Amino acid sequence: MKRSNSNLYRLSRRNFVAQAGQLGIAGMLGSLSWTARSDESIDLPFWNGQRELVTNFPQKGAMILQRTQPALLETPFEVFDQGVFTPNDRFYVRWHLPNIPTFIDPDVFRLKIHGRVGKPLALSMHDLLHDFPRVQIAAVNQCSGNSRGFFKPRVAGAQWSNGAMGNALWGGVRLKDVLDRAGVDSAAVQVRCRGLDSGILPATPNFMKSLTLDHARDGEVMIAYEMNGEPLPLLNGFPLRLVVPGWYATYWVKMLAEIEVLDQPDDNYWTAKAYLIPDTPGANITPVQKDVKMVPINRMVPRSFFTNLKDGAAVKRAQALKVRGIAFGGDTGVDKVMVSADAGHRWQEARLEMDHGKYSFRRWEIALRLANAGPHKLMVKAVNNSGMAQPDDANWNGSGFMRNAVESVSLQVS
């Protein structure tokens, strides 16, 4: 994580609150039309994949509507060909509980830190902007169930295509620095974070996620108030969200309002019972497998995608074909990206573009000439800096988590 310089940010400390206030008002007004629909639709490449393409959500451009309440919006995949960083207005949205505040006054908002600390805190946005070192990190935020729509047999849950992910330059303060200000007790073992979304029924558990104390204080976990140089959009967690680089987005608590330091392992529903995966390589089991040990989902795994080619595209024989895409290493950086033009028989190494940090998307490019007419299957796989490669075959588990199989596109050469 880098400590930022003022010239790296378009937002000054002085105008942050002013812009943030405007964003809050936009959210309040925009919420009145969340039930509107678009006449345009998109077909995702799996069974029952027709979705509406909507533009009526606050601070968002055209997005694939997965669900209205709570909001689930997917990034159209062509956006990922436009650059390493996903624009804020096209960044996917995933909430767990339906009651989401539509207006938060940044002048009144306070982040509470309590529990096993020497000095409980109630930090204002002014405190966070002025009293702590400002840092930034480029990191991929990916839903645990990204690509769930491709699972066979089909599993329950939002049927995402590959667009429940995004990469941003996050700006804010280290969680470590805030915890150090509060003074963590020697008996502390975990740090639990709560957002402002809530359920309709009083008995619905608050959305809370926990990290071990060592992880929370590793200097990379961040309390972010900026996303790509602007205040967080309302639907992406304004005014604060936790950023947990290299881990799935369930830990990236949105509208972060409370941090509690615990002296025993957290047993709340969202940590102890939800978002569990089989304790097997790749979280992979068979649909009939029973009595499997389950553990909380955690680190991401490597992935890569084609971004400028669509399945079924027609190309000319022997034509110079520039193929490009994105990759990320999961919980570490990308070591290499390999591309096959013959369904996996032979592999070539692609050229990696600028490295924005080990948790970021990395763009890649390769030049191909397809000499023979007929169908061709192109495949891509990433290998991360730990030597982990994408598997040839897709995993399966009952929650539809952690898909990262080798991706492919079919081309017709004439």
Image (cartoon, grey):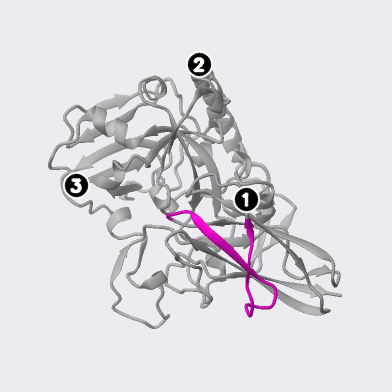
x 29%, y 41%: residue: 217
**Could you tell me how far apart the alpha carbons at marks 1 and 3 are, in whole angstroms?**
40 Å
Pinpoint residue 101: horizontal percent, then vertical percent.
46, 36
Pinpoint residue 85: horizontal percent, then vertical percent.
60, 44
Q: Nearer the viewer, residue 21 or 129?
A: 129
The amino acid type of the residue labelled 2 equals Arg
Q: 10 Å neighbourhood of mark 2: few (<14), some, or many (≥20)?
A: few
Relative to 345, is 226 on the left or the right?
left
Query: Is 349 within the magenta?
Result: yes
- Marker disc for residue 14: 2
Q: Nearer the viewer, residue 213 or 119?
A: 213
* Magenta stretch, residue numbers: 331-351
**Could you tell me how far apart the alpha carbons at marks 3 and 2 are, in whole angstroms?**
37 Å
x 60%, y 35%: residue: 30
Disc 2 element: helix
- Marker disc for residue 353: 1
Residue under label 3, please give it. Answer: 189
Pinpoint residue 84: horizontal percent, then vertical percent.
61, 46
